[in-house]
Amino acid sequence: MIISDWLNDPDSGKHVVLVTLLFFGAIETFGGHYKGTKRTRDDWIMEFLSFFLLSINSYIVLFGIIYLGKTVFPDAYNSWAGLSWWIAVPLYVLVDDLAQYWYHRSAHEYDFLWKHHRPHHAAEEMGVMVSWRNSWLYYLFLPNIWWVAICTFLGMIPATVMGLIFKQLIVTSSHSTWKWDEYLYRIKFLSPVMWIVERIIITPAFHYAHHGKSKADNISDPNGNFGNAFSIWDQLFGTATFTRQFPTEFGLQTDPKDSWSAHLFYPFVRSKKEGSEIGRDFQREKTASLEAVQVELEAGTHLWCQCGYSKNQPFCDGSHHGTKFTPIAFTLEKKQKMKLCNCKQSKVGPFCDNTHLDLIKANPDVE
Ligand code: FES
């Protein structure tokens, strides 16, 4: 009876979020994670404030949807309350997760959204509080809070609460420094089981790769692994990378260390840091040129800039965030001299194939 009352209370979703956060937060605290933390005062303020901004946005959207729904579609109010849990829970979770996948992916591919998701990737270490680092506007359009509000209006409150328990456990644990999958990967006979697990839900290894600083470590893929609770969308849409390893460097490749206020309230507050993407005068500038670049590279993995915006041509410096471009990684066995493409039109990826000479011939006036 008590459980059924709790499942029918729209506020229970908030309890789930808070309890999950406290649970993983306690494991991290007692596990000594916050000793010697890299977090600055701005990081702490951003993470706590971001959590409250999300809660405020959720209430605004919830009350707005219920008020609007009752006014425009009065007959729909509570009309799905009788839906079987077997249908309602998967319906809530799958629609929510697919919408989250595309919203998150768009936040990496479109400039406006990227600037609102960027605080999440400016974190230089993982931890439960990293799950709450996005701008106020990013949270206002977060599909999850709109879908929770719609499901609540339709009367699917218990299904929504159960779905939230499942989602929060996965989302919070995938950011946590308590990497539950790392222990299980070490047990050889569990390997096939873990293969199945990681192809269904988001594991810490899968999500850590998304937060890794750059692809150059052969583990990270900041432009992939976008899933929230399920990894099935990444596999379906070609953005999944499974390595079972954990990056050691997190954050932005080029980080001007913007203030918490600019991070959370862009475009109303702009960064004063030089070159910041959320600064007043920032403009993405093309730095590609009709000239190959002669380099001598050490053995190892290098990232070639494909977007043409890097300030460190022909190499990637992270300027591709907020575009659909991603860098191309190539690995050298030994130190080598070579000509790298800088017109970004070469048909052999990072390496110059003299396409720039054809481009010069076709457009002699263009530099
Ligand atoms: S800066 Fe990364 S691909 Fe251009």
Image (cartoon, helix red, strand yellow):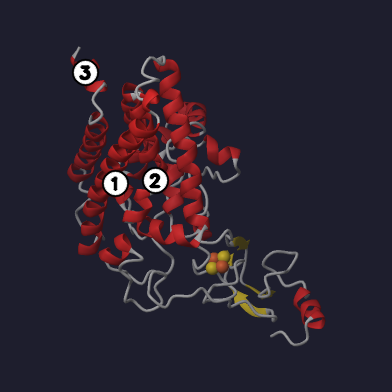
Horizontal and vertical percent position of residue 64: 31, 40
Q: Residues within 10 Å of mark 3 (few under 14, many from 20)?
A: few
Does the residue at mark 1 contact the one at mark 2 (Cβ under 8 Å)?
Answer: yes
Q: Which residue is mark 1?
A: 57
Secondary structure state at the residue bearing disc 3: helix
Please tell me whether residue 235 is drawn above or below residue 344 in the rendered image.
above
> Looking at the image, can residue 221 be seen?
no
Horizontal and vertical percent position of residue 51: 25, 48
Question: Of residues 362 and 329, which is closer to you in this image?
Answer: 362
Q: Which residue is mark 3?
A: 5
Secondary structure state at the residue bearing disc 2: loop
> Looking at the image, can residue 255 be seen?
yes
In the image, the residue with mark 3 has its CB under 8 Å from the nearest atom of ligand 1: no
Please tell me whether residue 167 is drawn above or below residue 75 in the rendered image.
below
Q: Earlier in the sequence, mark 1 or mark 2?
A: 1
Q: Name the side, left or right, on which 109 lies relative to 80.
A: right
Q: Name the side, left or right, on which 358 lies relative to 186.
A: right
- From mark 3 to mark 2, how far is it between C-alphas? 28 Å
Secondary structure state at the residue bearing disc 1: helix
Q: Name the side, left or right, on which 330 lies relative to 193.
A: right
Q: Residues within 10 Å of mark 1 (few under 14, many from 20)?
A: some
Quadrant in which ligand 1 is drawn: bottom right
Q: Residues within 10 Å of mark 2 (few under 14, many from 20)?
A: some
**Which dot marks residue 142?**
2
Please tell me whether residue 78 is drawn above or below residue 138 in the rendered image.
above
